[in-house]
Image (cartoon, rainbow, N blue to C red):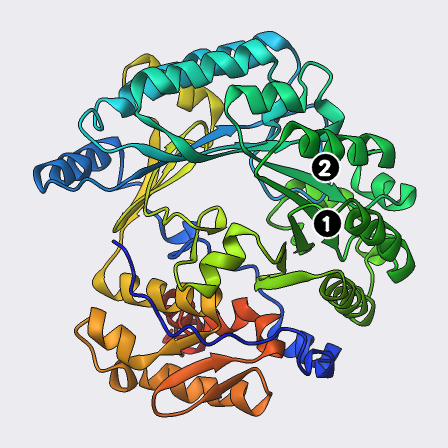
Amino acid sequence: MRFPVYSLRFLDSSTNLFRIDSDLIRRFGVSDADYRLYPQIDFFTEAFNAQAYSAWLKNCKAGHSRRPLSLYVHIPFCRSLCFYCQFNQILAESNDTITTYLNHLSREIKLQAQFFKENPKLEQLYFGGGTPTLLNETQLKNILQEIQQNFNLMKDGEFTIEVDSRQMSRLSMQALREMGFNCVIMGVQDFDHDVQQSIHRAQTEDVTLNAICDAQQAGFKTIRTELMYGLPAQTVKKFEYTLEKIIKIHPDQINLLNYNHFPERFKPQRNINSEDLPDADTVLEVLLLAISRLTEAGYKHIGMNLFAVRDDQLVIAQRQGRLCYGLQGYSVYPDNYRIALGMSAIGSFGSVLSQNDCDLQRYYEKLEHNVLPIMRGVELSADDLIRRSVMQALICHSILSFESVETYFPIEFKDYFAAELVELMVYEQAGLVTLDDQEIAVTPQGQLLMNSVCRVFDKYLRINRQRKNKPVLI
């Protein structure tokens, strides 16, 4: 389902931005919600299995749904464990481990392709992980060949791969480009030795900068680097050094990722001493420094701490009102028809979300029985679709016209979201949003706390809060 085009008035992220303070961050900024996905995985159910998934796809086919497709391929393997990681990863003990996985991935490609023989072209391909570049050139080529044999790839589509510059001994940027990849994402985090030691990610400055230069010389359409703030042992001065090095080499996009410490949920984070984490004031100072430097360097703040050069396709799409937001973040392609391949991968088909099995052996066993490895999923209600569209509009454009929602969905916005509008008054008083009878607009300060603004529209979070506050009869 494609969502409506909303009002195109944008907010300048640099205007009055520095009035935000740590008290505001403490009050509104603590959240582990990730609104690339709504509802969150916690609300997926195992009742939605491979049989339900297959039936839904067949119904789509019967209804002649022929949307462009997106394909996500998950490679879960890493050579070492990064302590900050929140993703499903497996330490690759040998090449045989990877070979076994790729053999099963090939089976899954064939099983999924059966549902899409008459579908339109595949316009987006994304290899994520883990570390996709642990694979050698032959292994990557074989997967791509399998995909090309089973799906109709667009020649001018967007084909992205996540690259670990430390794991490129068997690959080159030129080789990736010749395979067809035209977008690359590289994690940098921080160049400081003490920070790297504390997160168990040794990554030399020269190796990283050379990899970015190699990608530029190879002619990639988009090069994105990812920096992380709020890491243990990190200081403003240390982060400033890393930031200036990256700005100087001038990648197309720079993503600022906030480290969230949830050791009770993510086992690798238990290796991080919470006493080594910077305090809230330092974290805020790092973020504001980064925004100032990036703005001065000519980068445009798209939102969600993603910055891009002025002629980047995301900047142009935002200006034209066609920017999308989904499972891979910002994109010019709506990913509501996304096929997920690999252990733990998440797929999206209109009103259906699904996730593959997170246990490697169960993933293998299902494929060996020619069963899609769907572990759980959810079919979105009409309410879910309305709320998702509202969140995505705010994230993409920082403004939401009530009329545009009412035109697309059969609701009266102010009646339907009466409770949310009351709650947003607190955000308005704090300077995070402005409200009137026709729209919601997120201020520059509010853009830094967009997850918190979206949280107001999260029905599941609201229900959980109501349950916690409900008296228990004994």
- For disc 1, the neighbor class at 10 Å (few under 14, some 14 to 19, many from 20) is some
Residue 206 x %, y %: 86, 33
Query: Which residue appears at 42% of the width and 82% of the height?
Result: 440
Can you identify the residue that label 2 sits on? Answer: 82
Does 264 sit above or below residue 400? above
- In the picture, residue 155 is in which quadrant? top left
**Along the horizontal axis of the image, is 468 left or right of 45?**
right
Count of numbered circles in the view: 2
Q: Amino acid at mark 2?
A: Cys
- For disc 2, the neighbor class at 10 Å (few under 14, some 14 to 19, many from 20) is some
Foreground residue among 32 and 11: 11
Query: Cβ–Cβ below 8 Å for labels 2 and 1?
Result: no
Res 227 label = 1
Secondary structure found at label 1: strand
Does 355 sit above or below residue 294? above
How far apart marks 2 and 1 lie (CA) works out to 14 Å
Foreground residue among 108 and 116: 116
Is residue 91 in view from this perspective? no
- Earlier residue among tags 2 and 1: 2
Residue 397 x %, y %: 46, 69
Secondary structure found at label 2: loop
Q: Amino acid at mark 1?
A: Leu
Query: Which residue appears at 81% of the width and 69% of the height?
Result: 285
**Along the horizontal axis of the image, is 412 left or right of 229?**
left
Residue 330 x %, y %: 49, 53
Residue 72 x %, y %: 43, 34
Foreground residue among 155 and 80: 155
Is residue 300 in view from this perspective? yes
